[in-house]
Image: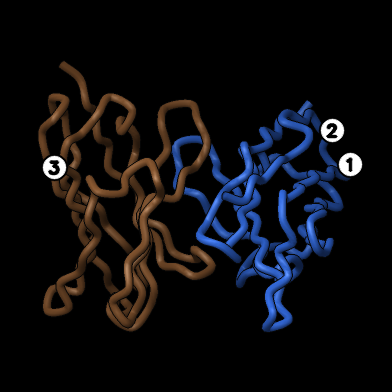
Chain colours: A brown, B blue
Amino acid sequence: EVQLVESGGGFIQPGESLRLSCAASGFIVSSTYMSWVRQAAGKGLEWVSIIYSGGNRYYADSVKGRFTISRDNSKNTLYLQMNSLRAEDTAVYYCARTDVFDIWGQGTMVIVSS
Amino acid sequence: EIVMTQTPLFLSVTPGQPASISCKSSQSLLHSDGKTYLSWYLQKSGQSPQLLIYEVSSRFSGVPDRFSGSGSGTDFTLKISRVEAEDVGVYYCMQSIHLWTFGQGTKVEIK
């Protein structure tokens, strides 16, 4: 079965770091594009970052310089390292198989608050 | 950044009646490869978004044929020919010609 399972979310204080994971099954992460998308409570969807099969990475301006997307091919897993977290980063974070976002994970919630 | 603007933001529809959502982009979504990179997603309450339509009018696997997409350049439309109760949720358009941006979402409810 093709699926994505996120983990790693939690409650964290401003300025701290967190790493999200997205375990894939049924397809190979390194052979496709993979993205992170987030959604604040009651709000719309915001694309955060992408990693291409060739390794190129891109980020939304709102997270550039603070977040890093990566993958572990041996574990078929996507990651999002989030540093210097801010209250406005509070959201449910989804991983999704790009380029048409046909497969989404169930999401993991990140709450940044003092 | 390409801005995506959806209208209306809220739609109340009688079951069996049609529904239509408009999505306008601030720049053309027509790529030099001839494809237009506009997709539609439905997010049901408490669930992850699900792909309905990609490249303006291509229906994703398993999507009922009552859903159809049309448009070109900067103006696009999602149509539901006969709304069913299971179609309730928030619909988003998304451009993928230059990075990725979503519309604000259109909430569809059943009367």
User: For the residue labelled by badge 3, is the local secondary structure a helix, a strand or a loop?
Assistant: strand
Q: Classify residue A51 as left or right of residue B5.
A: left
- Mark 2 vs 1: CB contact within 8 A: yes
Quadrant of the image occupied by residue B60: bottom right
Say the numbered circle drawn on residue A18: 3
Quadrant of the image occupied by residue A49: bottom left
- Identify residue type, mark 3: Leu
Give the chain of mark 1.
B
Residue furthest toward the right?
B17
Q: Nearer the viewer, residue B9 or A4?
A: B9
- Identify residue type, mark 2: Thr
The residue located at (80%, 45%) in the rendering is B22
Query: Which residue position is annotated with label 2?
Result: B14
Q: Estimate how packed mark 3 is, as few (under 14), some (14 to 19) or many (20 or more) residues with alpha carbons within 10 Å.
A: some
Of labels 1 and 3, the one closer to you: 3
Residues at marks 2 and 3 on the same chain: no
The residue located at (54%, 67%) in the rendering is A100
Point out the image quarter for the C terminus of chain B.
Answer: top right
Q: CA distance from mark 2 to mark 1?
A: 6 Å
Q: How many marks?
A: 3
Q: Estimate how packed mark 2 is, as few (under 14), some (14 to 19) or many (20 or more) residues with alpha carbons within 10 Å.
A: some
User: For the residue labelled by badge 2, is the local secondary structure a helix, a strand or a loop?
Assistant: loop
The residue located at (30%, 30%) in the rendering is A90
Quadrant of the image occupied by residue B17: top right
- Identify residue type, mark 1: Gln
Query: Which residue position is annotated with label 1?
Result: B17
x then y, percent, for residue A36? 35, 54
